[in-house]
C-alpha cells in the first residue's frame, strides 16, 4: 500500500512539475483530489470495517453515512454496489436503531422511517444520474440538475457536504453558465 501511495505521489509531483506548479483546477490538483478522496474512503472504511468485524452493534447511522459519502466521492459520484461496505454499514445501523429487525427479515417500517428511506432512495437516484453526468459530460450539467441534487441531499441527510456531490454539481453549473456568456 505504501508503494502505491509513493508512486501516486510521484506521478502527481511529475505532473505538477510539467504544469509549472499546482494551481486550482490543474490536472495535478485534480489528481491530488482523487487520491485524497480514495485515501479518505480507505481510512473511513477501515474504521467502519473494523467495527463491523468486532462490534457490529456499535455501528451508527452516522458511521453508515460517513462511509457512504466517502465511497460515493471516491467512485466519482457513482452509488456504491449492494455488496459494498456502505450497504453493510447501512444495514447494521438500521438493525441497531431498530428500523429493521434482523439480517434475514425486515420489519415493517413506520411512516417516519419509510419517509427517510424514500428520501435517501430519491437522493441515491438523483446522485447516480447527476454524478454520472458530472463525471462523463460536465459541460452538460444543468442548473436544474444542480438544484435537484442539492435539494435531495439536503432532504436525505439534513445538510449538504462541503465538496460533496451537490456542491460539485452546483459549481459545475455555475461554470457552464459562465461559459455560455
Image (spheres, rainbow, N blue to C red):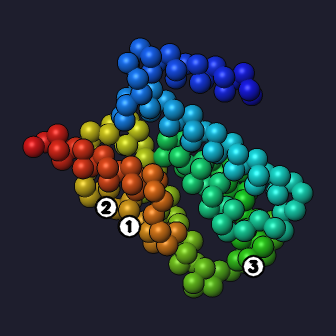
Indicate the position of residue 72 as horizontal and vertical percent values.
55, 48
- Residue 124: x and y in percent read 50, 58
| Residues packed near mark 3 inside 10 Å, few (<14), some (14 to 19) or many (20 plus) | few
Q: Quadrant of residue 11?
A: top right
Give the Cα separation between the discs numbered 3 and 2. Answer: 33 Å
Instruction: Give the residue pinned by disc 1.
Output: 151
State whether residue 83 appears in this view: no
Q: Secondary structure at mark 2?
A: helix
Seen from the viewer's position, the closer of residues 177 and 123 is 177
Determine the CA span between mark 3 and mark 1.
27 Å
Tell me if residue 26 can be seen: yes
Where is 108 relative to 25, above or below?
Answer: below
Residue drawn 59% across and 24% down?
9
- Going from N to C along the chain, the mark reached first, 3 or 1, is 3
The quarter in which the C terminus is drawn is top left
> What residue is shown with label 2?
147
The dot on residue 116 is: none
Residue 1, picture quadrant: top right
* Residue for point 87% across, 54% down: 53
Q: Secondary structure at mark 3?
A: loop
Amino acid at each position: 500500500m505504501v508503494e502505491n501511495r509513493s508512486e501516486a505521489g510521484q506521478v502527481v509531483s511529475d505532473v505538477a512539475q510539467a504544469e509549472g506548479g499546482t494551481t486550482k483546477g490543474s490536472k495535478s490538483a485534480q489528481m491530488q483530489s482523487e487520491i485524497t478522496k480514495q485515501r479518505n474512503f480507505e481510512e473511513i472504511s477501515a474504521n467502519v470495517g473494523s467495527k463491523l468485524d468486532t462490534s457490529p452493534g456499535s455501528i451508527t447511522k452516522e458511521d453508515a453515512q460517513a462511509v457512504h459519502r466517502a465511497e460515493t466521492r471516491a467512485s466519482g459520484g457513482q452509488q456504491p454496489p449492494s455488496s459494498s461496505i456502505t450497504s453493510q454499514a447501512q444495514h447494521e445501523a438500521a438493525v441497531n436503531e431498530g428500523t429493521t429487525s434482523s439480517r434475514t427479515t425486515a420489519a415493517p417500517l413506520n411512516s417516519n422511517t419509510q419517509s427517510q428511506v424514500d428520501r435517501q432512495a430519491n437522493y441515491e437516484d438523483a446522485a447516480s444520474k447527476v454524478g454520472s453526468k458530472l463525471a462523463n459530460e460536465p459541460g452538460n450539467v444543468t442548473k436544474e440538475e444542480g438544484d435537484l441534487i442539492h435539494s435531495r441531499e439536503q432532504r436525505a441527510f439534513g445538510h449538504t457536504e462541503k465538496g460533496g456531490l451537490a456542491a460539485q454539481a452546483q459549481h459545475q453549473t455555475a461554470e457552464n453558465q459562465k461559459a455560455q456568456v
